[in-house]
Image (tube, rainbow, N blue to C red):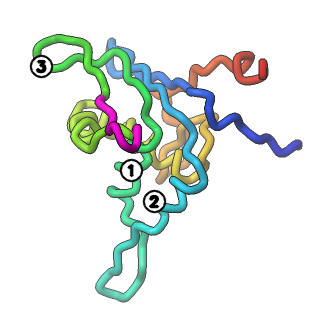
Amino acid sequence: MPIIVHDMKVIRELEIKNKDEVVVIKFKQLTYAERSKILTLTTKTEQGKVLLDYTRSCFLYLKYSLREVLGIVDEEGKEYKLVFEAETDYVTDYCIEQLLGSNITDELMYVADNLGNKGYLNEIVDPITKIPVKNISIVTNKKQLKKK
């Protein structure tokens, strides 16, 4: 099997199906530097073990990779838009907190966990069972990725 190098600039899409609603999330692949920065987030347990701070790392995976969300509305029924920090072009912490407080929290955490473990997504799996999550699918057109 050949080793594949993915274009870091291509925006990829996935769909989250939640009851009768579909949320489309557009995201970019994390750079090595971004992933390395996240992997330094550790917590020391009472037993002296050093563990990755899972919740904070998932938060940052989303912050660094999200580019757009479609199919979400705010409390007034208006289309929800991500807000980006001017100096870094990352989604603001407030936006990530809003999304993680929504009814697709579990799905977003699955996406973040998969980004952290693989860097590139071709399917989303449950981090505990390792079974693909049925209501999340990658929809990026593969022909579009091969054009370059």
* Horizontal and vertical percent position of residue 139: 57, 20
| Residue bearing mark 1 | 60
Q: Is residue 87 magenta?
A: yes
Quadrant location of the N terminus in the rendered image:
top right
Disc 2 versus disc 3: distance between alpha carbons?
32 Å
Is 140 left, or right, of 20 in this rendering? right
Residue positioned 48% across, 61% down in the render: 37
- Identify which amino acid the numbered label 2 is placed on: Ile
Q: Secondary structure at mark 1?
A: helix
Asked where in the image residue 102 lies, by quadrant, the reply is top left
Depth order, front residue of 43/92: 92
Disc 3 versus disc 1: distance between alpha carbons?
25 Å
For the residues bearing labels 1 and 2, Cβ distance under 8 angstroms: yes
Q: Residue furthest right?
A: 1
Disc with the residue nearer the chain's start (1 vs 2): 2
Please state the extent of the stretch shown in magenta in the rendering: 83-89
* Horizontal and vertical percent position of residue 22: 38, 16
Instruction: Mark 3 vs mark 1: give the one in front.
Output: 1
| Residue bearing mark 3 | 75
Is 117 left, or right, of 75 in this rendering? right
Per the rendering, the mark at residue 38 is: 2
Does 18 sit above or below residue 38? above
Disc with the residue nearer the chain's start (2 vs 3): 2
Q: Secondary structure at mark 3?
A: loop
Q: Residue furthest left?
A: 76
